[in-house]
Image (cartoon, rainbow, N blue to C red):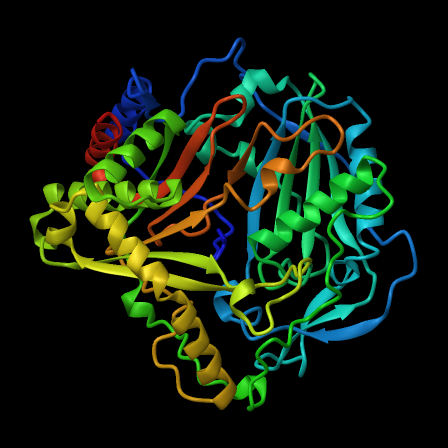
Amino acid sequence: MPAWSWKRVTELFLVVVSKIGECRQATMQSTRVGDGLGFLGLGLASSPQKCKTFSVIRSSQSLVRPCEQTPIATLDLSEIDSLPVLRSNAQTLHVYRHGEYHQVAKVIKEGLSKALVPYYPLAGRLKESNGNGGGQLQVECSGQGVWFVEAYANCRLDAVNYFDDTVASHSSKHGDLLPSQFPGADGLDLLLQMQVTEFECGGFVIGIKFSHSICDGLGSAQFLNAVSEMARGLKHPSITPVVWKRDFFTNSLPRQQLNLNTTTNSSSVPNYQLGHANIDIYMDQINHLKREIQESAGWSCSSFEVVAAALWICRTTAVIVSDNLKQNAQVKLVFFANCRHLLDPPLPKGFYGNCFFPVTATASSETLAHSSLADVVEMIQEAKAKLPNEFTNYIKLIKEGHQIEDDPFTPALSYETLLISEWGKLGFNQVDFGWGSPEHVIPIQASAIMPAAIVGTLPLPQNGIRLVTWCVEEIHRQNFIHHMMKMMGK
């Protein structure tokens, strides 16, 4: 998962001085490179006609309620759901090339209303049991509805290159495509907010704010697929949602007495600013590296493991080359793994809450920078092999009420820690409202100070991986890109 597991920040920013900005713009226009295996670089491409003054008009906004009567109840969230680091909204843009102009929002709205019947908790509100903070996190199933905004853009999607470029990832366009603030309520109380923006070509973009306290990446994709199925006329979603099942490791202490040390010293908050880069990698390149590992080491590996290892090596090497002070630092790679199958009994198919655990690989920066790709893949595989025991031990500590000094769900806010999340297999790319699957899905930057990368998929019809990264400072950015290009060109 889940992609969404670090502290969310609702505003995106990237601050650079004017001269660096000018150089960066020139560099971004020249770093896409091709070779016999494919290409790797910053995701910039020309479009037929540029949109000079992009604007969005929000024409309607309302609460979409379940189309049938649903239960009124108050449901407790799980210990993982209740983690402070998840008390945030995950934000995404889903870009669709085709649609039916002036009909898209209506179709999706109807599908949403139908899907909210089996997924009725999502139409409720987040609350704390004592109402004053510090109590147990709950969902009040009230049927109040999901905030839904209808909007129209003043151009075609190809005029903004389907938002398939690095520059757009930092523009105000994204704010225009996300739902406006729901009046009279805390934005974190609503579990789901959605905006459908139709473009003159018939294509559309869905901007979503999804409470991470209610769903992980798998769960949110499962729900969106249900909405799309209802929109296409299915009577029931293909995956029947589990009504709740959030008590899979109930602790022996009241929730507010859990001894999780999740506090952060404000004096330790980093003051660096992370630069953004999209890195596109074709499957030919990935398969080439996997074959090399198979031939040299004698064992196989996944595409995620290869890309994660390459990213970790190249980022670390770029930082060491640019800053000798970091040569002896301990560096960490952290990613979150689905744990539904590790419970006894396993969680049933259709569960859509949070159930994941962090996997951490650690090495010295000097060692990592001089390791082979196969060696680092092996480090990642060894860290993954520890997951069942580490997750089981964590559950045991929670149940018995033991002190947990270092909360594994809260990675240190440090330049030496890299957080990576795999989105390609969550199911977002299969969401089809009747006009085909999305061109691509754009994650909105979650934190300006947590070095991170999201492993997504290339926009259709290309086959490969898009790394969306906010993982290096501007002074390290070009070295990082250089090392990634060199690694993938082997």
In this rendering, the answer to whether 157 lies above or below 486 is above
In the image: residue 132, left or right of residue 409: right
Q: Quadrant of residue 151?
A: top right
- Which of 89 and 260 lies nearest the eye of the viewer? 260
In this rendering, the answer to whether 475 lies above or below 383 is above
**What x and y, as percent, mark residue 283?**
40, 28
Residue 274 in view here:
no
**What x and y, as percent, mark residue 85?**
48, 65
- Which of 235 and 150 lies nearest the eye of the viewer? 235
Question: Which quarter of the image is occupied by the C terminus?
Answer: top left
Q: Residue at x 27, y 35 (%)?
A: 17
Residue 462 in view here:
yes
- Which of 202 and 116 lies nearest the eye of the viewer? 116
- Furthest residue to the left? 324
- Furthest residue to the right? 69
Q: Residue at x 45, y 58 (%)?
A: 337
- Which of 405 and 15 lies nearest the eye of the viewer? 405
Q: Residue at x 61, y 20 (%)?
A: 157
Q: Residue at x 72, y 65 (%)?
A: 125
